[in-house]
Image: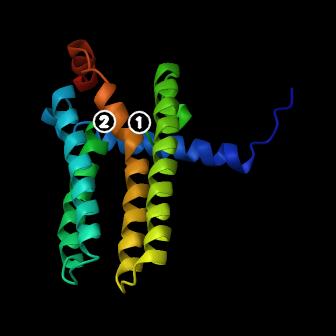
Amino acid sequence: MNLPEPTILTRYQTYRTRRFLENDNKTRHWLPKWRTQKRRRALCVAVIAALLILLALSISSLFWKWVPLLLIPMTVVFIVVWTMLQTVSGRHSDAPVGALDEWEVQQRNEARSIGLTITQGLVMVAVFILIVLSSAVDNERLAYAGGTWTLIALTAGICSPAIILAWITPDPDSEDILTERAP
Protein backbone atom coordinates (compact mmCIF):
# COMPACT_ATOMS: atom_id res chain seq x y z
CA MET A 1 0.00 0.00 0.00
CA ASN A 2 1.40 3.36 -1.03
CA LEU A 3 0.92 6.19 1.41
CA PRO A 4 0.73 9.68 -0.01
CA GLU A 5 3.80 11.80 0.54
CA PRO A 6 3.35 14.35 3.28
CA THR A 7 2.64 17.83 2.03
CA ILE A 8 4.41 20.92 3.24
CA LEU A 9 1.44 21.63 5.55
CA THR A 10 1.49 18.21 7.19
CA ARG A 11 5.26 18.39 7.64
CA TYR A 12 4.90 21.85 9.18
CA GLN A 13 2.13 20.65 11.55
CA THR A 14 4.31 17.72 12.58
CA TYR A 15 7.20 20.09 13.22
CA ARG A 16 4.93 22.46 15.16
CA THR A 17 3.58 19.65 17.30
CA ARG A 18 7.08 18.36 18.06
CA ARG A 19 8.34 21.85 19.00
CA PHE A 20 5.26 22.51 21.13
CA LEU A 21 5.71 19.26 23.04
CA GLU A 22 9.43 19.96 23.55
CA ASN A 23 8.68 23.44 24.90
CA ASP A 24 5.87 22.06 27.05
CA ASN A 25 8.29 19.57 28.60
CA LYS A 26 10.65 22.44 29.44
CA THR A 27 8.03 24.76 30.92
CA ARG A 28 5.43 22.44 32.47
CA HIS A 29 7.09 22.71 35.90
CA TRP A 30 7.66 26.47 35.84
CA LEU A 31 5.64 28.60 38.28
CA PRO A 32 3.96 25.61 39.99
CA LYS A 33 2.14 27.71 42.60
CA TRP A 34 0.56 29.85 39.86
CA ARG A 35 -1.14 26.90 38.14
CA THR A 36 -4.28 26.91 40.27
CA GLN A 37 -7.48 28.25 38.80
CA LYS A 38 -7.58 31.07 41.35
CA ARG A 39 -4.08 32.29 40.44
CA ARG A 40 -4.69 31.86 36.71
CA ARG A 41 -7.79 34.01 37.09
CA ALA A 42 -5.72 36.63 38.93
CA LEU A 43 -3.30 36.64 35.98
CA CYS A 44 -6.24 37.00 33.58
CA VAL A 45 -7.43 40.05 35.49
CA ALA A 46 -3.87 41.43 35.49
CA VAL A 47 -3.60 41.01 31.70
CA ILE A 48 -6.94 42.76 31.17
CA ALA A 49 -5.95 45.53 33.59
CA ALA A 50 -2.63 46.02 31.79
CA LEU A 51 -4.46 46.31 28.46
CA LEU A 52 -6.90 48.84 29.91
CA ILE A 53 -4.03 50.90 31.36
CA LEU A 54 -2.28 50.79 27.98
CA LEU A 55 -5.51 51.98 26.35
CA ALA A 56 -5.85 54.83 28.87
CA LEU A 57 -2.25 55.83 28.24
CA SER A 58 -2.74 55.77 24.49
CA ILE A 59 -5.84 57.97 24.80
CA SER A 60 -3.86 60.32 27.05
CA SER A 61 -1.17 60.54 24.39
CA LEU A 62 -3.57 62.72 22.41
CA PHE A 63 -3.22 65.43 25.02
CA TRP A 64 0.27 65.11 26.50
CA LYS A 65 3.50 64.53 24.56
CA TRP A 66 5.31 62.73 27.41
CA VAL A 67 2.68 59.99 27.88
CA PRO A 68 4.17 57.62 25.26
CA LEU A 69 7.17 57.25 27.56
CA LEU A 70 4.85 55.57 30.08
CA LEU A 71 3.75 53.08 27.45
CA ILE A 72 7.19 51.45 27.52
CA PRO A 73 7.22 50.27 31.16
CA MET A 74 3.54 49.34 30.99
CA THR A 75 4.23 47.26 27.89
CA VAL A 76 6.98 45.44 29.79
CA VAL A 77 4.53 44.75 32.64
CA PHE A 78 1.99 43.44 30.12
CA ILE A 79 4.55 41.15 28.46
CA VAL A 80 5.65 39.70 31.81
CA VAL A 81 2.09 39.03 33.01
CA TRP A 82 1.03 37.70 29.60
CA THR A 83 4.02 35.33 29.49
CA MET A 84 3.22 34.10 33.00
CA LEU A 85 -0.40 33.43 31.99
CA GLN A 86 0.66 31.56 28.87
CA THR A 87 3.18 29.50 30.88
CA VAL A 88 0.82 28.46 33.67
CA SER A 89 -2.04 27.70 31.28
CA GLY A 90 0.14 25.45 29.11
CA ARG A 91 -0.26 27.61 25.99
CA HIS A 92 -3.34 25.60 25.01
CA SER A 93 -4.71 28.51 23.00
CA ASP A 94 -1.68 28.26 20.67
CA ALA A 95 -1.28 24.49 20.70
CA PRO A 96 -1.36 22.48 17.48
CA VAL A 97 -4.08 19.86 17.15
CA GLY A 98 -1.60 16.99 17.53
CA ALA A 99 -0.68 18.13 21.04
CA LEU A 100 -4.22 18.22 22.42
CA ASP A 101 -6.97 15.70 23.05
CA GLU A 102 -10.42 16.06 21.43
CA TRP A 103 -11.95 17.99 24.34
CA GLU A 104 -8.99 20.40 24.49
CA VAL A 105 -9.18 20.98 20.72
CA GLN A 106 -12.89 21.74 21.01
CA GLN A 107 -12.31 24.16 23.91
CA ARG A 108 -9.41 25.81 22.05
CA ASN A 109 -11.45 26.24 18.87
CA GLU A 110 -14.39 27.75 20.77
CA ALA A 111 -12.06 30.17 22.57
CA ARG A 112 -10.39 31.11 19.27
CA SER A 113 -13.79 31.78 17.71
CA ILE A 114 -14.67 34.12 20.55
CA GLY A 115 -11.21 35.70 20.24
CA LEU A 116 -11.77 36.39 16.54
CA THR A 117 -15.10 38.06 17.32
CA ILE A 118 -13.45 40.18 20.03
CA THR A 119 -10.62 41.13 17.66
CA GLN A 120 -12.99 42.16 14.89
CA GLY A 121 -15.21 44.17 17.22
CA LEU A 122 -12.42 46.02 19.04
CA VAL A 123 -10.47 46.82 15.87
CA MET A 124 -13.66 48.09 14.18
CA VAL A 125 -14.32 50.38 17.15
CA ALA A 126 -10.73 51.67 17.15
CA VAL A 127 -10.74 52.30 13.41
CA PHE A 128 -14.19 53.92 13.49
CA ILE A 129 -13.12 56.27 16.30
CA LEU A 130 -9.95 57.09 14.38
CA ILE A 131 -11.93 57.90 11.23
CA VAL A 132 -14.39 60.10 13.11
CA LEU A 133 -11.70 61.93 15.08
CA SER A 134 -9.50 62.47 12.03
CA SER A 135 -12.32 64.26 10.26
CA ALA A 136 -13.34 66.32 13.32
CA VAL A 137 -10.10 67.08 15.17
CA ASP A 138 -6.81 68.53 14.03
CA ASN A 139 -4.32 66.89 16.38
CA GLU A 140 -0.78 66.02 15.34
CA ARG A 141 -0.70 63.09 17.78
CA LEU A 142 -3.89 61.46 16.48
CA ALA A 143 -2.12 59.03 14.14
CA TYR A 144 0.09 57.75 16.96
CA ALA A 145 -2.83 57.45 19.38
CA GLY A 146 -5.00 55.72 16.78
CA GLY A 147 -2.23 53.32 15.92
CA THR A 148 -1.78 52.36 19.55
CA TRP A 149 -5.57 51.94 20.00
CA THR A 150 -5.64 49.57 17.07
CA LEU A 151 -2.58 47.69 18.33
CA ILE A 152 -4.12 47.33 21.79
CA ALA A 153 -7.39 46.12 20.22
CA LEU A 154 -5.48 43.49 18.22
CA THR A 155 -3.52 42.46 21.30
CA ALA A 156 -6.70 42.11 23.36
CA GLY A 157 -8.19 39.88 20.69
CA ILE A 158 -5.03 37.82 20.46
CA CYS A 159 -4.95 37.38 24.26
CA SER A 160 -8.63 36.56 24.68
CA PRO A 161 -8.50 32.82 23.80
CA ALA A 162 -5.76 32.23 26.39
CA ILE A 163 -7.65 34.32 28.95
CA ILE A 164 -10.85 32.34 28.31
CA LEU A 165 -9.11 28.98 28.54
CA ALA A 166 -7.14 29.95 31.66
CA TRP A 167 -10.34 31.20 33.29
CA ILE A 168 -12.51 28.14 32.58
CA THR A 169 -9.97 25.33 32.97
CA PRO A 170 -10.39 23.64 36.35
CA ASP A 171 -7.48 22.75 38.59
CA PRO A 172 -5.76 19.51 37.60
CA ASP A 173 -6.53 16.43 39.69
CA SER A 174 -3.96 15.71 42.37
CA GLU A 175 -3.47 12.25 40.80
CA ASP A 176 -2.49 13.89 37.49
CA ILE A 177 0.07 16.07 39.24
CA LEU A 178 1.58 13.06 41.01
CA THR A 179 1.87 11.05 37.80
CA GLU A 180 3.44 14.03 35.99
CA ARG A 181 6.17 14.29 38.62
CA ALA A 182 6.97 10.58 38.58
CA PRO A 183 9.89 9.71 36.28
Residue at mark 2 = 89
Q: Left or right: where does residue 144 sit relative to residue 131?
A: left
Mark 2 and 1 residues: CB-CB less than 8 Å, in contact? yes
- Which residue extends farthest bottom? 140
**Label 2 amino acid?**
Ser
Q: Left or right: where does residue 72 sit relative to residue 135?
A: left
The x, y position of residue 112, in whole percent, is 49, 38
Work out whether residue 65 can be spotted: yes
Q: How many marks?
A: 2
Q: Secondary structure at mark 1?
A: loop
The x, y position of residue 57, in whole percent, is 23, 67
Query: Looking at the image, which residue is at 22% across and 54% down?
Result: 50
Give me the disc on residue 92: 1
Q: Does residue 162 lie above or below 178 as drawn?
A: below
Q: Quadrant of residue 51?
A: bottom left
Query: Looking at the image, which residue is at 20% across and 76% down?
Result: 67
Q: Quadrant of residue 86?
A: top left
Q: Does residue 115 lie above or below 154 as drawn?
A: above
**Label 1 amino acid?**
His
Query: Looking at the image, which residue is at 32% across and 25% down?
Result: 168
